[in-house]
Amino acid sequence: MDESLQRAVRWREVGRKVAVATVVATRNSAPRPVGSKLFVSDSGDLEGSVSGGCVESDVVLAAEEVLAGGPPRLLTYGITDEMAFGIGLPCGGEIDVFVEELTEVEQPDVTLIVVAGEGVGERLRDPELELTARRRGSSHVMELAGRTVLADVNAPPPRLFVYGAVDTAEALCRAAKLLGWRTLVADARASFATPERIPSADELLLLWPEEAMAHAQLDLGTAVVVLTHDDKFDLPLVRGALASDAFYVGWIGSRRNQERRRGLLLEDGVTDDELDRISGPAGLDIGAASPSETAISILAEILAVRAGRAGGRLKDAKTRIHAAL
């Protein structure tokens, strides 16, 4: 449960009514992704954001109407000719915001909410759709039998699993913390896997690859980075990562060594399609040299893969600036 929701839950625990406004769709350069939330209490407290400040004042008015007994509402904001001197988004984007009263304190990992059409505000139960949303890992909307349904995904933050407790591992953990990610570093070498060397890791394991992966339970929200430069660690770790649901698998090393290790994996039964999942050498081509620069390069590629982007320069891109996760 994120901090904004935690605060909203505390408001309800002391007897306040709370409305929640959720971004359910974005178009063009909207400043907040689908699933972003603004909580409004009946005493005027605010927590969270749906636009970074562009339309919050109007959303608060709608939230107050809902708290006064009004029905849930779907609102659309954006700059048009008619709205040029009114409420809008300076960045030129457009967002749909669904406003309703917060009634459920315990938030499931996936909630299906009707936001337009028959039965606005109704909660649906569909295990197959919930599983699909869980695998996707981010909030999104879908059309079902003439109704618009928000799959509100309350997923934990992504995890960064690093094998090889070297200086780049510490730099990766420091940078990932700025993103709010959980970090786990493992190594079988006792002289490497020490808190003094890797103080920023949320979890530090002294384990061989198979044991470390069994402990970590690599899933759809996990990015794997291999930093050991040693076949006895690299090969079993990458084989195991490719057999998991991890959304990113990367390892470092020269292009020549990359090809050599790929050949060994092919001999061991790994398919070409599986090898295509490997980002190696890991990172974007930004000219990184130091461990900190390398960490930024690798994390940038991880973010691009997670968003389905190529990772080039924004000035050359034809897609929207902000990812529609």
Image (cartoon, rainbow, N blue to C red):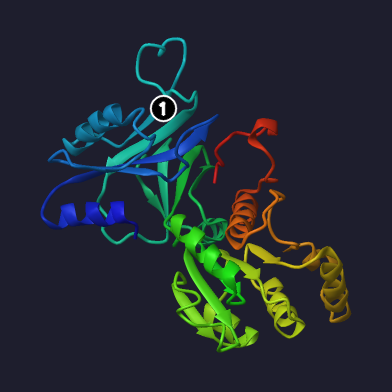
Query: Local crowd at mark 1 within 10 Å, few (<14), some, or many (≥20)?
Result: some
| 67 on left or right of 176 | left
Residue under the image location 59 percent in, 67 percent down: 168
Residue under the image location 48 percent in, 36 percent down: 25
> Quick check: 36 above or below 183?
above
In the rendered image, residue 4, in percent from the top left (x then y), is placed at: 29, 51
> Quick check: 264 above or below 94?
below
> Quick check: 245 above or below 18?
below
In the rendered image, residue 44, in percent from the top left (x then y), is placed at: 16, 38
Residue under the image location 29 percent in, 27 percent down: 58
Tell me the quarter of the image containing the N terminus: bottom left
| 266 on left or right of 162 | right
| 2 on left or right of 133 | left
Q: Tell me the residue that label 1 is attached to.
A: 76
**Is residue 271 at all visible to an observer of this figure?**
no
Say which of 207 and 28 sits in front. 207
Q: What secondary structure is marked by label 1?
A: strand
In the rendered image, residue 85, in percent from the top left (x then y), is placed at: 37, 11
In the displayed orientation, state which residue is furthest to the front.
Answer: 290
Q: Amino acid at mark 1?
A: Thr
Say which of 78 and 98 sits in front. 78
